[in-house]
Image: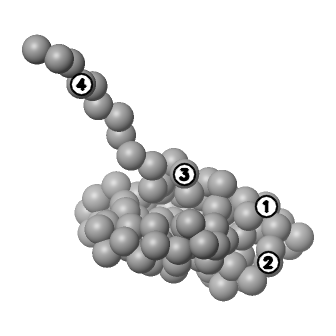
Amino acid sequence: MAITDKEIIQLKTKYGAIFQLDIPTDEGDKTIILRKLDRATYSAGSKLMEKDELLAAETFLRGLYIGGDELEPIIKDFESLRVAASLLADVIGTRTGNVRKL
């Protein structure tokens, strides 16, 4: 699914930072749009991360999904979910800072 420039502007206005994930599937590439990570979604997903990485990825995807192609076929397909999980690192990753002893 192609997202238009107008839709991107509308989503950015509503959600701030947004991310496009292009995920290959047996039916061709699927595109989903995710919003910036929030504390509630982070808490829910991080609790699952130690026990089941794919369940955590599913939780993050469901919590952050705001548009694009339908999410459910991606979640139900094992290979597509694994690809989406690997792409989530850029969405849920933390920024790094610096520490200096003064």
- Mark 2 vs mark 3, foreground winner is 3
Residue at the spot x=56%, y=57% of the render?
88
Write down the residue under mark 4: 99
**Alpha carbon of mark 2 to alpha carbon of mark 3: how far?**
19 Å
Q: Quadrant of the N terminus?
A: bottom right
Residue at the spot x=34%, y=55% of the render?
17
**Alpha carbon of mark 3 to alpha carbon of mark 4: how far?**
23 Å
**67 displayed left or right of 74:** left
How packed mark 4 is, by other alpha carbons closer than 10 Å (few <14, some 14-19, many 20 or more), is few
Counting residues from the N terminus, which is met first, the one under dot 3 or under dot 4?
A: 3
Q: Helix, strand, or loop for circle 1?
A: strand
How packed mark 2 is, by other alpha carbons closer than 10 Å (few <14, some 14-19, many 20 or more), is few
> Looking at the rendered structure, which numbered label has been put on residue 89?
3
Counting residues from the N terminus, which is met first, the one under dot 3 or under dot 1?
A: 1
**Does residue 52 appear in this view?**
yes
Q: Are marks 4 and 2 in contact (CB under 8 Å)?
A: no
Q: Helix, strand, or loop for circle 3?
A: helix
- Mark 3 vs mark 1, foreground winner is 3
Write down the residue under mark 1: 24
Counting residues from the N terminus, which is met first, the one under dot 1 or under dot 2?
A: 1
Whole-percent x and y of residue 66? Answer: 45, 74
> Looking at the rendered structure, which numbered label has been put on residue 77?
2
Q: Are marks 1 and 2 in contact (CB under 8 Å)?
A: no
